Amino acid sequence: MNMSAARTATPALLMLSASLFISGAAHAQAPAYPVKSIRMVIALAPGGGTDTIGRFVAQKVSQAWGQPVVPDNRPGAGGAIAAEAVARAAPDGYTVLTASSGITITPSIMKLPYDPLKDLLPVTLAAVSPGVMVVHPSVPAKNVKELIAFARARPGELFYSSSGQGSAQHLTMALFTQMTGLRMTHVPYKGTAPSVTDVVGGRIAVTVASVISTRPMFTSGKLRALAVVGPKRTPALPELPTVAESGVPGFGVDNWYAVFLPGGTDKAIAHKMQETISRALLEPETRKLLLGQGLDVAGSSQEEFAKIYADEIAKWAKVVRAVGMTPGLGS
């Protein structure tokens, strides 16, 4: 290179060198993640699906990243207490939420101190707890079509139970009656166990509850399982059809467990967490372990889960309005 060319190239080389230096310095200064313990806020009390998934995810993330992930159960208000704690936390990746699909119902039945679409960042759908529609054996229905015919001939006479007013069980059955045009009477209980117990006792005709809550009863003949209420069959009961297959096209409700971060969390952090959790969930031994507890592994992408989350908030808002529940009061 001659001197003239060298003089011409020098400013460009200096600019390139400076750019590389600045880029390298910025990269060196970018904080690593994670460098300290992470708090896993779990939206329900110890025991049950939400707690099982939250603690499982905490363990797997801790093993993968070499940092403690500490479970912190914050039950109450349909998951809103835990969701608010995460929505208000710093968006730095050190506060995580595990919640059930119930948090897509709470925006319609109570006034929330956070925006569910802006203040929470969906990370991944972790697992699904398939629900089953069951009846007392005295109900002469062997499938959903027969239940519809039986109920239609007795408007208002059949009772269905749920774990409480505005619960997922309640609104699943409310959606079912809307889509079929049936008139059935809702009887709310304080929890899933008593709502199922009264179906077993014959005081209630029908309910919807998880596979793990109902399987011992219908395998022993104390209840009769009619269909899976989710949009697809479950590996836990592959022979049982869905409600949609059984005469109610388009019906499908999943009770799911998922992971969220505070809104505004860096995309790289959210992506790293999604990849780590999904990888752990898709391990064969994990699938077997969770299936034994009545759970179907999901492990979705952020985009897939964000759509599910937004769609279900909108869906339940319509159902809540249709059943006449008052937002802010839950009744």
Image (cartoon, helix red, strand yellow):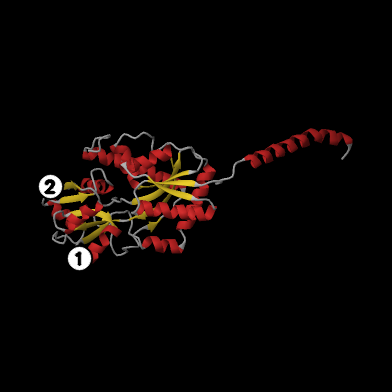
Q: What residue would you read off at disc 1?
A: 221
Number of dots carrying numbers? 2
Q: Is residue 11 left or right of residue 130?
A: right
- Sort mark 2 into few (<14), some (14-19) or many (20+) by Cα contacts within 10 Å: few
In the image, farthest residue toward the right: 2
Classify mark 2: helix, strand or loop.
loop
Q: Residue at x 13, y 54 (%)?
A: 203
- In the figure, 218 relative to 160: above or below? below
Mark linked to residue 210: none
- The disc, 1 or 2, on the residue closer to the chain's N-terminal end is 2
Q: Residue at x 49, y 53 (%)?
A: 61
Q: What residue would you read off at disc 2?
A: 156
Quadrant holding the N terminus? top right
Classify mark 1: helix, strand or loop.
loop
Specify whether residue 280 is in view: yes
In three-dimensional space, the C-alpha distance between marks 1 and 2, rounded to whole angstroms, equals 26 Å
Of 247 and 221, the residue lying toward us: 221
The x, y position of residue 74, in whole percent, is 37, 44
The x, y position of residue 162, in whole percent, is 22, 49
- In the figure, 261 relative to 64: above or below? above
Specify whether residue 211 is in view: no
Q: Residue at x 44, y 53 (%)?
A: 57
Q: Amino acid at mark 1?
A: Gly
Quadrant holding the C terminus? top left
Of 300 and 102, the residue lying toward us: 102
In the image, farthest residue toward the bottom: 220
